[in-house]
Image (cartoon, rainbow, N blue to C red):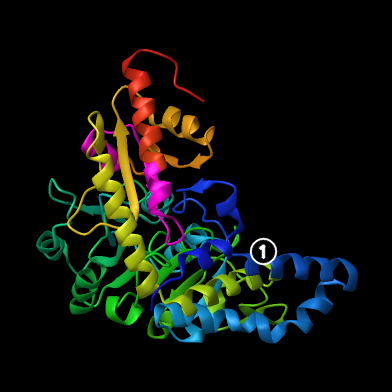
């Protein structure tokens, strides 16, 4: 399928206002996502929240179908959560940890994930062990196998890190976890919607992602995938009336389904908006949009590498649509702010977001341009021109232009 870029941009009102390269932070939504959220909220205000929810019940349930369709999962393996970190935490704290259990992870873990690994270490007495990567950022899979013992209960991996263009070899890791019958959690908040993700090929037991990034949905939404076969091994950290049934003063029954990770209260306006975003991507085909993202990000890297004083800081054999770089003499946050004043959205990825990897590479922060399929070569040319101008000003000791 050939993408109609003009139509994609017409469907995305924000492209008329800004040049948006912050899609790994929060993408620009399509108009139909905005419209259905607005429509639903207006109806809630005039007809009542419970009543409108009942009216939209069938459409709301389409969410599970669209999410499952995107990652090749069954409807009843999907649960709505408030964001990717929420989903990861719900999974982590539902696993029956015992003192001495081992959690294997990687050097590129995101801060919110790793903080909760440390909390489990503190509260449950588990060990957190890091599988090393080579100097080019590629995880050493043979070392992962060597580190496996009967004590390893979970392997937790960030599919695409926040601070580089790396794509982790999720399928190869899945083969290792299945070989050794170890639970496998994939943080896919930067990958679902950007690259093709198939949970059957990856063989993960858990996957967590968010709405606002490459899926182009509203903020405050996400979903998790939980393989049916592992549900009986889990106990949720907290209960909700959608996950448990209160029998009497002393007893309750636990719902043995993926619903144990959901809460009764949620914004159905956002669920509908998220559903529209998922449907839009499914209709385009993520295989098609990924080719476009690959083309544009490769182009950006090649153009940045032509400029003296610019260092592209991406690592790994296989790279994604996140392009990270540094500009000699210019702080990454200062660069992002200067570009923002000129209508170009980037973000700065700082040390605290991925401490182990950033320290290993001696980085305090990098500029991050995250490409989406609705971006254009002309937008990239403008970005590169502005970055080059900022570098020239920095070298001449002049103030960075606004």
Residue 5, percent from left and from top? 46, 65
Q: Quick check: 111 left or right of 176?
A: right
| Secondary element at image label 1 | helix
Residue 242, percent from left and from top? 65, 77
| Residue 182 shows in this picture | yes
In the image, is residue 111 part of the stretch drawn in magenta? no
Q: Can you say which quadrant of the picture contains the N terminus? A: bottom left
- Count of numbered circles on the image: 1
Q: Where 122 falls versus 29 (above or below)?
A: above
Mark 1: few, some, or many residues within 10 Å (few <14, many ≥20)?
many
In the image, is residue 365 part of the stretch drawn in magenta? yes
Q: Where 350 falls versus 390 (above or below)?
A: below
Q: Where 81 falls versus 198 (above or below)?
A: above
Residue located at (82% from left, 66% from top): 42
| Residue 254 shows in this picture | no
Q: Quick check: 209 left or right of 62?
A: left
Give, as a single range, the part of the protein colored magenta.
Answer: 356-381
Q: Quick check: 257 left or right of 348?
A: right
Residue located at (58% from left, 51% from top): 16
Residue 163, percent from left and from top? 34, 46
Viewer-proximal residue, 349 or 180?
349
Residue 244, percent from left and from top? 62, 79
Viewer-proximal residue, 299 or 157?
299
Residue tagged 1: 34
Q: Quadrant of residue 193?
A: bottom left
Q: Quadrant of residue 190?
A: bottom left
Residue located at (24% from left, 28% from top): 309
Furthest residue toward top = 397
Q: Quadrant of residue 12?
A: bottom right
Residue located at (27% from left, 43% from top): 303
């Amino acid at each position: 399928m050939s993408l109609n870029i003009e139509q994609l941009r017409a469907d995305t009102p924000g492209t008329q206002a800004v040049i948006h390269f912050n899609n790994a932070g929060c993408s620009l939504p399509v108009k139909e996502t905005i419209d259905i959220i607005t429509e639903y909220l207006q109806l809630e205000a005039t007809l009542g929240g419970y009543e409108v929810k009942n009216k939209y019940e069938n459409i709301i349930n389409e969410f599970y179908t669209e999410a499952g369709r995107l990652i090749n999962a069954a409807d009843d393996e999907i649960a709505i959560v408030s964001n990717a970190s929420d989903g990861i935490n719900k999974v982590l704290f539902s696993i029956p940890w015992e003192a001495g259990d081992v959690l294997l992870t990687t050097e590129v873990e995101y801060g919110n994930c790793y903080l909760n690994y440390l909390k489990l270490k503190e509260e449950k007495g588990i060990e957190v062990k890091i599988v090393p990567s080579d100097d080019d950022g590629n995880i050493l899979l043979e070392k992962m196998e060597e580190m496996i013992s009967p004590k390893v209960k979970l392997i937790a991996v960030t599919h695409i890190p926040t601070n580089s263009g790396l794509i982790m070899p999720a399928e190869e890791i899945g083969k290792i976890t299945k070989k050794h019958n170890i639970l496998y959690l994939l943080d896919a908040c930067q990958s679902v919607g950007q690259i093709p993700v198939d949970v059957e090929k990856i063989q993960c037991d858990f996957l967590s992602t968010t709405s606002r990034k490459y899926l182009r949905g509203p903020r405050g939404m996400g979903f998790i995938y939980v393989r049916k076969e592992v549900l009986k091994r889990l106990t949720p950290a907290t209960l909700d009336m959608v996950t448990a049934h209160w029998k009497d003063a002393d007893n309750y029954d636990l719902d043995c389904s993926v619903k144990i990770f959901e809460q009764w209260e949620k914004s159905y306006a956002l669920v509908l908006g998220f559903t529209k975003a998922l449907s839009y991507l499914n209709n385009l085909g993520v295989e098609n949009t990924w080719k476009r993202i690959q083309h544009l990000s490769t182009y950006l890297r090649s153009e940045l590498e032509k400029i003296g004083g610019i260092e592209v800081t991406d690592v790994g054999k296989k790279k994604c649509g996140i392009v990270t770089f540094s500009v000699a003499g210019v702080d990454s946050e200062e660069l992002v702010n200067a570009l923002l004043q000129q209508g170009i959205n980037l973000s700065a990825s700082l040390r605290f977001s991925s401490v182990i990897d950033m320290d290993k590479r001696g980085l305090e922060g990098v500029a991050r341009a995250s490409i989406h399929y609705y971006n254009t070569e002309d937008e990239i040319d403008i970005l590169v021109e502005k970055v080059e101008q900022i570098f020239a000003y920095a070298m001449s000791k002049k103030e960075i232009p606004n």
